[in-house]
């Protein structure tokens, strides 16, 4: 069962991560079919300092062996959205952490399981279904405050998304995603 775990990082730790990123206000590096109007950072060094702490929460929830894979940090601007999808091979479990929240913007996670063949490298294609018909309201929403995490989600097996972000041009939300692979 997914849940929000409060205050995993404190304000100084969050500030350290944000200050370490090379954020250029308004600049985007992600405009594709999955996400738009965002800036992304793969395995930013400051995010890696907290892997073992976050992994302790993951291991408490799972009854399986895992190996850390990577982090990805995303700065989301007005109009950003995350299209419904499942994650690629190797991203079996993900913890989503909020670093900055100017406006509420929940992560939606389907409660319907999708089985993807183990050898399929690409994510599930939601174009196979009409989103509203297929979901039929069967999903949960999680909205975190800075320092909070959404406990280990099986992003490869459960479709997830964020609806378009509506905020002022000078606002943004920032999240870091910690990924593990099942071994």
Image (cartoon, grey):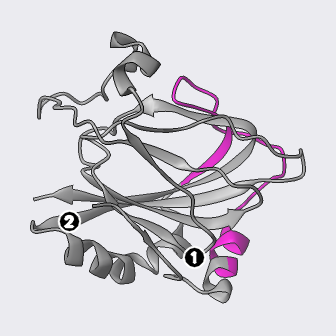
Quadrant, the N terminus = bottom left
The secondary element bearing badge 2 is classed as strand
The secondary element bearing badge 1 is classed as loop
Check residue 105 for magenta coloring: no
Seen at 77% across and 60% down, the residue is 102
Q: Which residues, given as a range, are shown in magenta? A: 15-41
Quadrant, the C terminus = bottom left
Q: Is residue 122 left or right of residue 73?
A: left
**Residue receiving disc 1:** 147
In which quarter of the view is residue 150 placed? bottom left
In the rendered structure, which disc, 2 or 1, sits on the residue that comes first in sequence? 2
Packing grade of label 1 (10 A; few <14, some 14-19, many >=20) is some
**Residue receiving disc 2:** 67
Check residue 17 for magenta coloring: yes
Seen at 37% across and 77% down, the residue is 54
Q: Is residue 72 above or below residue 45?
A: above
Place of residue 93 in the rendered image (x, y in percent of width and height, measured from the top left) = 28, 56
Front residue of 98/140: it is 140
Q: Between tags 2 and 1, which lies in front?
A: 1
């Amino acid at each position: 069962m997914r849940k929000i775990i409060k205050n995993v990082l404190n304000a100084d730790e969050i500030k350290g991560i944000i200050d370490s990123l090379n954020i250029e206000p308004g600049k985007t590096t992600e405009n594709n079919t999955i996400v738009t109007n965002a800036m992304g950072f793969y395995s930013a060094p400051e995010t890696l300092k907290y892997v073992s702490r976050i992994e302790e929460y993951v291991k408490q929830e799972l009854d399986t062996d895992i190996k850390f894979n990577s982090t990805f940090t995303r700065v989301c601007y007005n109009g950003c959205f995350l299209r419904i999808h499942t994650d690629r091979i190797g991203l079996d479990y993900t913890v989503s952490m909020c670093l900055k929240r100017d406006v509420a913007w929940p992560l939606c996670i389907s409660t319907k399981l999708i089985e993807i063949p183990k050898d399929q490298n690409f994510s599930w294609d939601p174009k196979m279904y009409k989103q509203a018909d297929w979901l039929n309201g069967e999903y949960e929403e999680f909205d975190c405050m800075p320092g909070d995490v959404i406990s280990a989600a099986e992003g490869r097996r459960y479709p997830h998304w964020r609806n378009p972000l509506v905020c002022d041009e000078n606002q943004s939300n920032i999240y870091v995603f910690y990924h593990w692979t099942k071994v």
